[in-house]
Image: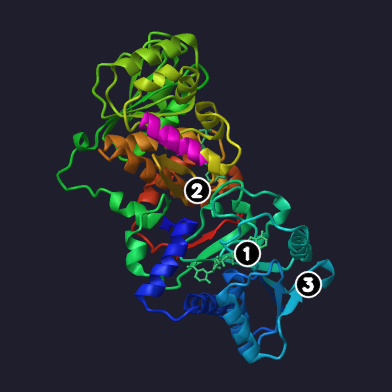
Amino acid sequence: MKVFSKEQIYEGDKVTEERQKLPPSELMERAGLQIFNWMHMRMQGAQVPIHIFCGIGNNGGDGLVLARHLITHGYNVETYVVNCGNSRSKDFLTSYDKVKEVTKKWPQLLKCESDFPEIHKDDIIVDAIFGIGLNRSIEDWIKALFHHFKASEAFTLSVDIPSGLYTDKPVEDVNGVVKANYTLSFQSPKLVFFLPETADYTIQWEVIDIGIDREYLMTTDTEVELISKNEVLPIYKPRTKFSHKGDFGHGLIIGGSYGKIGAVQLATRSVLVSGAGMVTAYVPECGYLPLQTSLPEAMVMTDIDEKKITDINFDITPSAIGIGVGIGTDTSTIQAYEAFLKSNKVPLVIDADAINMLSENKKLLKLVPENSILTPHHRELERLIGTWSSDFEKLEKASTFSSKHKVILVIKGAHTITVYGQKKFINVTGNSGMSTAGSGDVLTGIITGLLSQKHLPIEAALFGVYLHGRAGDLAVEEFGYQSLLAGNIIDYLGEAYIDLFKQPEQAQEEVKTEDKA
Ligand SMILES: NC(=O)C1=CN([C@@H]2O[C@H](COP(=O)(O)OP(=O)(O)OC[C@H]3O[C@@H](n4cnc5c(N)ncnc54)[C@H](O)[C@@H]3O)[C@@H](O)[C@H]2O)[C@@H](O)CC1
Ligand SMILES: Nc1ncnc2c1ncn2[C@@H]1O[C@H](COP(=O)(O)OP(=O)(O)O)[C@@H](O)[C@H]1O
Ligand SMILES: [K+]
């Protein structure tokens, strides 16, 4: 699913109004009506007090349309206009006049703290104060209003975006943003729903279709995309009856050091389970026995050194290589890595200390083959691209790095973001049960396995991240958040593949509530 920028959303409105020859404020009417339908379906006329707080722009206008429908359907509604400025938008004023047609109870004007209404815990708050048009800092009395919402503990439904969030800049003051239980977002989820610093401002979100011009939506390219089942299905390669293991490539995992052979076991097993025809693990001598014993399907080659990688020298022709899990940063390992990079031509998946070695020896970056996939977690990324002051700066720096070095960056996290030049792909699968030792090694193995099956590098990265998270989601149902082990993700990889064809995707909705176990 595309994630449109603020500018693209405004453009989409304009194009839609022109092409569909819409009367003024028709889109606002659709937006307000859709929110009404959403609430009406759930509330079925229940007389819970609903407090609708409207700003003075189009977000506020949406709130007023909603108020009108709720009032005409006999709901218990109080409407407020948060007087945050003088320039009311044209459509806001139209909606305002229409409210007056259906009730004598005009919206109350709020100008300062003493105007705030009492809100009971069991009431409902609708936040239609600021939408994507937020363009300056929020005044203190409005922050106090947001605090008043929070203190009430009432269910808070945000219209389009929690008020106070910018679509393209970091939050200025954490007290200046509404904490929503649910956000109904028009046409496209907003990037901020997925970034670590801002995702928490809404517990759940859902996209509402307001009939923006289809052609515009289809043909407009976005920098950001959500990757869910619909997006990865076309990447799946069915097998033919007469296929043989040679068709699915030979993956090679290079890594391990004394005490960290398990990382190689996890990655190597994942290569096979993701579908590669063959796999070899290249490990220090001490890894030979454990690997041969625990993973009979794998072949094993060893370094001359007992405890670490000192010379990467193999006589096979792998179709893809994953390097770095458990490898360490010993001087002799760095030398071996450099020599390997100088001779290697095969696409790489680079993880863990193989990323750290690049960060510490930037000249090695020139030796990394084009379109290699680097899979850093937060700390590894920081060492690689430097620190950042916000999630937006992080993404910008990652894009610059990806373009400059022609590599794919898989930034791991709750929402893993794959950065490929200016493009950013946000993964929607995965859960906090996966915050456990070795789950990154599994990802490295899966992506290496997909690469060896001749997927394009960007496809291998996106599909691998999706499958890894989906396998984690299926595994957590059996093991629970606390007890899930990285190995369980591998065990559920087959289910994740089968699940691709099992059920239709949950309708553009995300449940972020963790710890349901
Ligand atoms: N395609 C869509 O997504 C549609 C979106 N609509 C709504 O329109 C909204 C955008 O409307 P607008 O562009 O009018 O913007 P907003 O309604 O988000 O707010 C902008 C208004 O608030 C003022 N303002 C901004 N920051 C402020 C601050 N810190 N303190 C005080 N005042 C501030 C602005 O000067 C302007 O008057 C969307 O978020 C959505 O709710 C719908 O009405 C129609 C279709
Ligand atoms: N809260 C979470 N939600 C979703 N996925 C997560 C979460 N925590 C971790 N993961 C995933 O688990 C993996 C952890 O990788 P990493 O930090 O490298 O672990 P390790 O080094 O132990 O193997 C990543 O793919 C990450 O996206
Ligand atoms: K809002």
Q: Which residue is mark 2?
A: 430
Residue 450, given in percent of the width and then of the height, sits at: 32, 39
Q: Nearer the viewer, residue 276 or 461?
A: 461
Dot 3 or dot 2, earlier in sequence: 3
Asked which secondary structure carries label 1, the reply is loop
Numbered mark located on residue 130 in the image = 1
Residue 342, given in percent of the width and then of the height, sits at: 32, 15
Q: State the CA–CA distance, disc 3 to disc 2.
A: 36 Å
Tell me the kind of residue under disc 3: Ile
Horizontally, is 389 left or right of 375 in the view? Answer: right
Residue 336, given in percent of the width and then of the height, sits at: 39, 12
Tell me the kind of residue under disc 1: Phe
Dot 3 or dot 1, earlier in sequence: 3
Instruction: Give the magenta part as a residue range.
Output: 395-413
Residue 43 seen anywhere in this rendered image of the structure: no
Horizontally, is 129 left or right of 16 in the view? Answer: right
CB of mark 2 near ligand 2 (< 8 Å): yes
Q: Quadrant of residue 513?
A: bottom right
Other-residue count near label 1 (Cα within 10 Å), few / some / many at <14 / 14–19 / ≥20: many
Residue 310 is a magenta residue: no
Kindly check if marks 2 and 1 are in contact, taking CB atoms under 8 A apart as contact: no
Q: State the CA–CA distance, disc 3 to disc 1.
A: 20 Å
Q: Quadrant of residue 47?
A: bottom right
Q: Which residue is mark 3?
A: 119
- Residue at the image point whose x is 44% and y is 59% from the top: 8
Residue 403 is a magenta residue: yes
